[in-house]
Structures are given as structure tokens and as C-alpha cells.
Amino acid sequence: MSKGKTADTAPRQQTPSTPQPPQQDAKKASAPENPVKGLKKLRYIVFLAKPYWKYGKMYTLVTLLTSVVLTPLSSVAGTMLPKAAIDAVMQHKTTPQILTAIGLYTAVILVASVVQLIIQQSYAAMAQMRIQYNLLYEVNERALYTDFKYYDDPEFFSQFSYAQQNFAAQAQQVTYLVPMLLNSLITAVAMGAIIASAGPVLLLITLGFVLLQTVIQLPQVKMNADLSVELTDWSRRTSYVYRNLQMKENTAEMRTSSAGEKLLRAFRATIGEITQRYAKFIRATMKYVIPQGALSPLQTSIILVYIILFVIAGDTSKIGLYASLSAAAATLSGQLSAVFSNVSGVFRSVVYGERIARFFETVSVIEPPRSGALPPPEGRYAVELRDVTFCYRNSDFGIRNLNLTITPGQRVAIVGENGGGKTTLTKLLLRLYDVDSGQVLINGRDIREYDVHALRRRIGIAYQDVRILAMSLRDNLTVYNDATDEQLYGIIEKLGLQSVLEKSGGSLDVQISREFTEHGIVLSGGEAQRLALARLFTGPFGLLLLDEPSSALDPLAEARLMQVILDKSNTATTIMIAHRLSTVRDFDVIYHMENGSIIETGTHDQLMAARGKYYEMFTKQAANYID
């Protein structure tokens, strides 16, 4: 390996070139290339219905059976009950006969209602909960296996948030649509038959009013769907305020600066936008509200007049028929309105389903599991970046024609000012992004040939911004590999985490958070960073990536911890990103990055002797300590 102010020029390993997957623009990849139009959009109904059938075949069949048998049967019995009772009275039947007539119809209604209630309480509610949690799991699992590049795209976050909030509910709604539609049609046919027995005029009156009601309702369907989509986007903004005010680590800043007030102003502004949008929606729909409200009482009055004047016509023996016809007309009107409402629901579900499907149709290249991928190699890793070029979308920053070779077990530091490309380099080594051109090689093979998830389990990572899970100390220590209690206690002692063990009362099962319990413990910044590093001692790794792993520690604690890291690196190739150059003096080689390129390479002594930018940075930092 060459030293001094030049990039490493060690001979490259010859490997066959691996085809480059297309680097897609996140926004374009997250939208369908050929938008679905016309009746083909009904595919989104199938898309929403499939999960319920997948997780609840029996539930779907029970719901269908209840809707097409029990509910219509109850409606018909309820409609005929007044006629049976009144006819029995008008025909001067005995009291037992009258009660028997009433009892038979009541028994049918009672049995149908009780059976439906039993199904709902003992089976359906539990089945719905189980299915809905499975659907939420699918959304989050899909997000986990979606390429990292999409998280740079606000549109993806909107789709993700929308799917989280609406997928389960809309899938359930679609599952109800078919049974409800069949229920409405069967009940409507039965009511139509009852009404038609008194002549076609009453049937035509009822159908006419239902048609008018549908014409009034249809324009409001798209308005409601569009409003729902817009509210989801606004919901993300209000949720951002909620999260920041809830996070304990933000508490001090919110109170000691104007950050909290700015967030509240942003929240109020968002509420103002929502209110204005609602006002616009109300103005647009108000012209439909008055006629829609007038139709029902007008329909009832016309049907009442018709039955009295043209059906009963002075014949009191038909009072029972009048009662049934009134009930049948009201039920028919309601069921036909329900038919059209369910059809409108189909259109609404198409709108919802299309937006949810965009999230699931996001094309990912890296994260989805694939067959034929190679298992990661054992032992210490050799790392090579060969003519690597990578640029973020919608950004001028990038890495261009980077060459870098790291031998197995080598301890490498990457230094430089912010924005130089150091963290980007680690993301490429983890294959969070694919390069635009060139190759990233692990042990001489293109990183894309390996099972990416298994490979990442062999790469230990400690970030500057530590994310501690709201789980037990044991769970936080074993995110990479399981370990025995004896091993975990040894790691805790080695990393100087005895203070955490004292807080936990010696237990590995105490919660490292008070997110869910007041009995959890809270870690300092230094303890959190030590814990993150402790994870790297639970098993063998081929490569360690350390991104400012000791930034929250005081200099003495940092020096002790660096010695532990350097000892550990004897069993793994180690790459450390650092801003404090005092921490990398003992590393085998130091790369100085600037604007996506390596501008200096060498040991600490060589770079100091070269008196380049590394020398300038180191002496300035040292002067700060001396001053």
C-alpha cells in the first residue's frame, strides 16, 4: 500500500464484472410507469380484498353467509310482522292466535339477531383484530424491505404514512362491500316483491326517489376521497410536532430556545390550512345537502298519501297491508340507497386502494430477499472500492471515481470535514445504496452477489447518533448475536458499563427506556455510546464500521475506549470515521476525504510529515487543547 499524499495503489483483484442495477429516481420508481385507467382500476378492489382472504378465509365466509341469509331474513320478518299482527286483530282472531302470529315472526327476528350478535362478539371481533394487525405488520415489513433511497423522498413518506393509517381499515371496508351489496340486493328484491303485490306505482315512486338520492350523492364521493388524501399529508406535519414534543431528548431545547414555539406556530398554521380546506369542502358540498335532506320526508309523505288514497281506499281490512307496505317502502328505499352507496363505496375504495398500492408497488432492488445470493464469507474482510461513483438524487454532492483497498484485519481511519463523503462511504459498504458505476468488493466479490441481510449481520456498526431500543438491556446488547448471561456481564465490564448495571439492579432484563414503564432506566449519552459498542463484542464480525463512536465521552474515557476498540479490531477489519484526529493516531492507515475524493493517505506520522491538510487540521485541534 502506498503512503503519503496519494491514494492507495495496491494491485487490484481481478473479478468478473457484475451487471449494474439501474439507479432509479426515487420519485419515479415510487409511481407506476403506466397508470391504470377505466374499469381496470377495479384491480385495486381485489388488491384490498386479498389480504382479508389470506388471513381470514373463515371470517370472510361467515361474514358473507350472515349478510346474504340472516340479515335479509330478519328484514323480511320485521316488515311482515305489522301486517301479520294487524290482520290477526282485524280478523277477530283469538288472543292466543294473535300472540302466536306475533311470536313466530318475533322468533325469526330474535334468532337471526342473536346469532349475528354471537358471531360478532365471540368470533368476528377477535378475527378482525387479528387480521388488521397482520395487515399493519405487512405495511411495516414492506417498509423494512424497501430500499433506503426512498427515505430521501417525501412522497414515499406520504405513501407509507397513508398505508399505515388506511390499509387495514380500507381492506376491511372492501371485505364488507360484497356481502353488504348482496344483502342490500336480496333485501331490496324481497321488499320489491312485497310492494309489487299492491301494484307497480308504489315501486316506481320508491325507485324514483332512490335514483334522485344517488344522483345527488355521487359527486360527493370523489370530494370525500380527495379530502382524505390531503388530510393524510397534513397529518404527517402535525404528527411531526407531536413526536418532537414527546421526545425526552428534545425537552431541554424546547424550553431553552424558541424551537417549541416555532413548532407550535407551525402546528397552528397547519390547523389553519386544514380549516380552510374543510371550509372549501363544505362550500362545495353544501349545494347537495339541502336537496338530499328534503328527499326523505318528501318520499315518506308521497308514499303515505298513495297508500291511503289508492291502496286502502276506505277498506279498513287493508290496514295491516298499509303497515307492511310503509315498512317495505322505507326498507326498499334504504336498501336501494345502500346498493348505490356500496357502489359509491367501490369507487371510493378504488381511490384509496390506488394510493395504498403505490406504496406496495414501490420497486426495490436491494432489500427484498432473493434466491441464489451468496452467503457472506467468514473471517476478516478485505474491502475494495473500485472506480466507485455515486451521487444522491437531487443533490450535487457525490463520490467520483473513488479507489480504496483495505486488507483483512487492517485498522483504517477516514477523516475530513463534514460533507466530505465519509458517512456516504459507509452506506455504500453496507449496501444501503448501490453505486452508480464501479464496484464495491468484499473478499474479491462484488457486494451485490451476497445476501445483503446476512452480510450486514457480519458487519458491526456503531453510529454517532445511537438509537437505543425501548426494550431490555439484554435485547439492546444482542441486536447482532445472542449471548449467554456470562458473556454479557463480561462485555459490560470490558466496556465500562457497570454504571448501567448498577441502575438496573444487576438485571439484564430491565427496560432501557421509560417509554412503556416507569421502572425503566435512562442512559447518559456516554453510556448509550458504550452500549452501542458493546453490541460489537457479542460475536465475530468480518468488518467493523465506527462512525464517531466516542463523541459523547470525555477525553480520558475516550482514550480508554479507543484502546478497547483497537484491541477488538485484531479480529475484524476496522474502519472508523473521526473528526477528533487524536483518536486515530494509532491506526494502520488514515484516509483524508474531501468533496467525495481521497486527497491524502498514510499513517499519522507520514501525514504529519507531509504537512498537508491533515497536518493543518491536527495542529489546529491540538492548539485548541493546549490553549
Image (cartoon, rainbow, N blue to C red):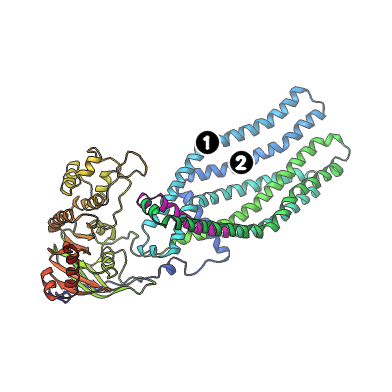
In the rendered image of this protein, does residue 379 appear above or below residue 607? above
The tag earlier along the polypeptide, 2 or 1, is 2
Task: Name the image quarter holding residue 19.
Answer: bottom left
Q: Given the image, on which type of amino acid does mark 1 rest?
A: Gln
| Mark 2 secondary-structure assignment | helix
Q: Left or right of 69: which side holds 409?
A: left
Magenta segment boundaries in residue numbering: 226-250
User: Residue at left 26%, top 63%?
Assistant: 450
Q: Left or right of 104: which side holds 588?
A: left
Q: Can you identify the residue that label 1 sits on? A: 121
Residue 467 rendering spot, x and y as whole percentages: 31, 53
As rendered, which of 147 and 83 lies closer to the eye? Answer: 147
Please say whether residue 552 is one of the residues in the magenta stretch: no
As rendered, which of 546 and 607 lies closer to the eye? Answer: 607
Q: Can you identify the residue that label 2 sits on? A: 69
Residue 292 rendering spot, x and y as whole percentages: 71, 53
Q: Given the image, on which type of amino acid does mark 2 rest?
A: Val
| Mark 2 or 1, closer to the camera | 1
In the rendered image of this protein, does residue 24 appear above or below residue 321? below
Image quadrant occupied by the N terminus: bottom left
As rendered, which of 240 and 327 lies closer to the eye? Answer: 240
How busy is the neighbourhood of tag 1: few (under 14 within 10 Å), some, or many (20 plus)? few
